[in-house]
Amino acid sequence: MSRKYLNDKYCVRCGRKNATPYLRKNISLLEDGRSKLVVVDVGCGNGRNSEYMKERGHTVTSLDMVPDYGHKMVLGTDLIPKKDKGTDIILCNYLLMFLNKKERTQLIKEFKRIALKNCIIMVELYPAKDCYAKTKEEMIEMQAEIFNPLKWQKIRYSQGRFIAQNG
Protein backbone atom coordinates (compact mmCIF):
# COMPACT_ATOMS: atom_id res chain seq x y z
CA MET A 1 0.00 0.00 0.00
CA SER A 2 1.36 3.43 -0.86
CA ARG A 3 0.47 6.88 0.38
CA LYS A 4 0.20 9.93 -1.85
CA TYR A 5 2.10 12.98 -0.72
CA LEU A 6 1.05 16.56 -1.41
CA ASN A 7 3.76 16.88 -4.06
CA ASP A 8 2.45 13.81 -5.93
CA LYS A 9 5.26 11.58 -4.67
CA TYR A 10 4.68 8.13 -3.25
CA CYS A 11 6.40 6.19 -0.51
CA VAL A 12 5.72 2.48 -0.76
CA ARG A 13 7.16 1.98 2.74
CA CYS A 14 4.42 4.00 4.47
CA GLY A 15 2.13 1.00 4.58
CA ARG A 16 4.47 -0.90 6.86
CA LYS A 17 3.66 -1.14 10.55
CA ASN A 18 6.98 -1.79 12.34
CA ALA A 19 9.87 0.63 12.80
CA THR A 20 12.42 0.39 10.01
CA PRO A 21 14.86 -2.51 10.41
CA TYR A 22 17.77 -0.03 10.29
CA LEU A 23 16.34 1.88 13.26
CA ARG A 24 15.69 -1.29 15.27
CA LYS A 25 19.16 -2.63 14.48
CA ASN A 26 20.92 0.63 15.43
CA ILE A 27 18.82 1.88 18.35
CA SER A 28 21.69 1.44 20.81
CA LEU A 29 23.87 3.75 18.69
CA LEU A 30 21.17 6.42 18.68
CA GLU A 31 20.43 6.20 22.38
CA ASP A 32 24.08 5.72 23.38
CA GLY A 33 23.07 4.74 26.90
CA ARG A 34 20.83 7.80 27.26
CA SER A 35 17.12 7.78 28.10
CA LYS A 36 14.18 10.19 27.78
CA LEU A 37 15.61 11.88 24.70
CA VAL A 38 14.04 14.55 22.49
CA VAL A 39 13.44 13.03 19.05
CA VAL A 40 12.24 14.69 15.84
CA ASP A 41 10.88 12.29 13.20
CA VAL A 42 10.95 14.26 9.94
CA GLY A 43 8.72 12.74 7.27
CA CYS A 44 7.15 10.43 9.84
CA GLY A 45 4.71 8.83 7.40
CA ASN A 46 2.33 6.57 9.32
CA GLY A 47 4.28 7.11 12.56
CA ARG A 48 5.88 3.69 12.83
CA ASN A 49 9.30 5.05 13.88
CA SER A 50 7.73 7.69 16.13
CA GLU A 51 5.69 5.06 17.96
CA TYR A 52 8.77 2.87 18.40
CA MET A 53 10.69 5.77 19.97
CA LYS A 54 7.75 6.71 22.22
CA GLU A 55 7.54 3.11 23.44
CA ARG A 56 11.19 3.46 24.45
CA GLY A 57 10.31 6.48 26.64
CA HIS A 58 11.43 9.32 24.38
CA THR A 59 9.60 12.59 23.66
CA VAL A 60 8.86 12.61 19.94
CA THR A 61 7.82 15.38 17.57
CA SER A 62 6.45 13.79 14.39
CA LEU A 63 6.37 15.88 11.20
CA ASP A 64 4.92 15.12 7.78
CA MET A 65 3.34 16.81 4.78
CA VAL A 66 0.22 14.67 5.13
CA PRO A 67 -1.45 15.31 8.50
CA ASP A 68 -2.76 11.82 9.20
CA TYR A 69 -0.04 11.34 11.83
CA GLY A 70 1.93 14.03 13.59
CA HIS A 71 2.20 17.73 12.84
CA LYS A 72 1.66 18.97 9.31
CA MET A 73 4.45 21.00 7.74
CA VAL A 74 5.78 21.57 4.26
CA LEU A 75 9.07 19.71 4.48
CA GLY A 76 11.91 21.61 2.89
CA THR A 77 10.06 24.92 3.18
CA ASP A 78 8.69 25.38 6.70
CA LEU A 79 10.85 25.69 9.80
CA ILE A 80 10.91 22.66 12.07
CA PRO A 81 8.81 23.65 15.11
CA LYS A 82 11.57 23.00 17.63
CA LYS A 83 13.83 25.38 19.52
CA ASP A 84 17.45 25.90 18.51
CA LYS A 85 19.83 23.30 19.91
CA GLY A 86 17.00 21.31 21.51
CA THR A 87 17.02 17.90 19.82
CA ASP A 88 18.91 14.72 20.73
CA ILE A 89 17.94 12.49 17.78
CA ILE A 90 16.73 13.33 14.26
CA LEU A 91 15.10 10.58 12.23
CA CYS A 92 14.78 11.20 8.51
CA ASN A 93 13.83 7.87 7.03
CA TYR A 94 12.76 7.57 3.39
CA LEU A 95 12.04 11.26 2.85
CA LEU A 96 14.91 13.26 1.38
CA MET A 97 14.84 11.57 -2.04
CA PHE A 98 11.35 13.07 -2.52
CA LEU A 99 12.62 16.63 -2.01
CA ASN A 100 14.42 18.72 -4.60
CA LYS A 101 17.92 20.08 -3.93
CA LYS A 102 16.65 23.44 -2.61
CA GLU A 103 14.25 21.70 -0.21
CA ARG A 104 16.96 19.29 0.97
CA THR A 105 19.35 22.19 1.58
CA GLN A 106 16.74 24.03 3.68
CA LEU A 107 16.01 20.91 5.71
CA ILE A 108 19.72 20.28 6.35
CA LYS A 109 20.00 23.84 7.71
CA GLU A 110 17.06 23.09 9.99
CA PHE A 111 18.71 19.87 11.21
CA LYS A 112 21.81 21.84 12.14
CA ARG A 113 19.72 24.51 13.87
CA ILE A 114 17.73 22.16 16.13
CA ALA A 115 20.57 19.75 16.93
CA LEU A 116 22.07 19.66 20.40
CA LYS A 117 25.77 18.98 20.72
CA ASN A 118 26.13 15.21 20.24
CA CYS A 119 22.76 15.00 18.44
CA ILE A 120 22.56 11.90 16.30
CA ILE A 121 20.85 11.81 12.91
CA MET A 122 19.65 8.74 11.03
CA VAL A 123 18.96 9.06 7.30
CA GLU A 124 17.62 6.36 4.99
CA LEU A 125 17.17 6.72 1.22
CA TYR A 126 16.15 4.50 -1.65
CA PRO A 127 16.01 4.97 -5.43
CA ALA A 128 12.57 5.01 -7.04
CA LYS A 129 11.09 6.14 -10.32
CA ASP A 130 8.89 8.79 -8.64
CA CYS A 131 11.63 10.56 -6.68
CA TYR A 132 14.73 12.67 -7.37
CA ALA A 133 17.05 9.65 -7.04
CA LYS A 134 15.76 7.30 -9.68
CA THR A 135 18.84 5.07 -9.81
CA LYS A 136 21.27 3.62 -7.30
CA GLU A 137 23.97 5.96 -8.62
CA GLU A 138 21.74 9.04 -8.17
CA MET A 139 20.89 7.88 -4.66
CA ILE A 140 24.59 7.52 -3.76
CA GLU A 141 25.27 11.01 -5.13
CA MET A 142 22.31 12.43 -3.19
CA GLN A 143 23.50 10.74 -0.01
CA ALA A 144 26.84 12.57 -0.30
CA GLU A 145 25.00 15.86 -1.02
CA ILE A 146 23.09 15.37 2.23
CA PHE A 147 25.92 14.10 4.43
CA ASN A 148 28.75 16.43 3.40
CA PRO A 149 27.06 19.78 4.30
CA LEU A 150 26.17 18.43 7.74
CA LYS A 151 29.88 18.15 8.59
CA TRP A 152 29.00 15.67 11.34
CA GLN A 153 31.04 12.67 12.41
CA LYS A 154 30.19 9.39 10.68
CA ILE A 155 29.01 6.62 12.96
CA ARG A 156 27.65 4.34 10.22
CA TYR A 157 27.71 5.04 6.50
CA SER A 158 26.57 2.58 3.87
CA GLN A 159 24.75 2.71 0.59
CA GLY A 160 21.45 4.53 1.09
CA ARG A 161 21.75 5.18 4.80
CA PHE A 162 23.87 6.76 7.45
CA ILE A 163 24.05 7.65 11.12
CA ALA A 164 26.11 10.68 12.12
CA GLN A 165 26.76 12.74 15.24
CA ASN A 166 26.98 16.48 15.71
CA GLY A 167 30.28 17.06 17.48
Image: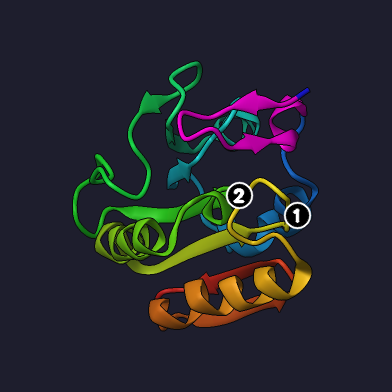
Indicate the secondary structure of the residue bearing disc 2: strand
Q: Residue at x 64, y 25 (%)?
A: 3
Q: Which residue bears the numbered disc 2?
A: 93
The picture places residue 151, in percent across and down from the top left corner, at 41, 83
Question: Along the line of sight, which residue is nearer the eye, 1 or 134?
Answer: 134
**Relative to residue 22, is residue 58 depicted above or below?**
above
Q: Is residue 167 visible?
A: no
Q: Which residue bears the numbered disc 1?
A: 22
1 and 2 marks in contact (CB < 8 Å): yes
Left or right of 70, for residue 51 = right
Indicate the secondary structure of the residue bearing disc 1: helix
Task: Give the position of the N terminus as an image quadrant.
Answer: top right
Callout 1 amino acid: Tyr
The picture places residue 8, in percent across and down from the top left corner, at 54, 32
Q: Give the magenta range.
A: 2-17
Q: Residue at x 51, y 48 (%)?
A: 35
Residue 3 belongs to magenta span: yes
Q: Is residue 138 visible?
A: yes
Left or right of 12, for residue 94 = left
**Relative to residue 112, is residue 130 depicted above or below?**
above
Disc 1 crowd rating (10 Å Cα; few below 14, some 14-19, many 20+) is: some
Q: Residue at x 46, y 44 (%)?
A: 42
**Relative to residue 152, is residue 81 depicted above or below?**
above
Instruction: Residue 110: give its label.
Output: none
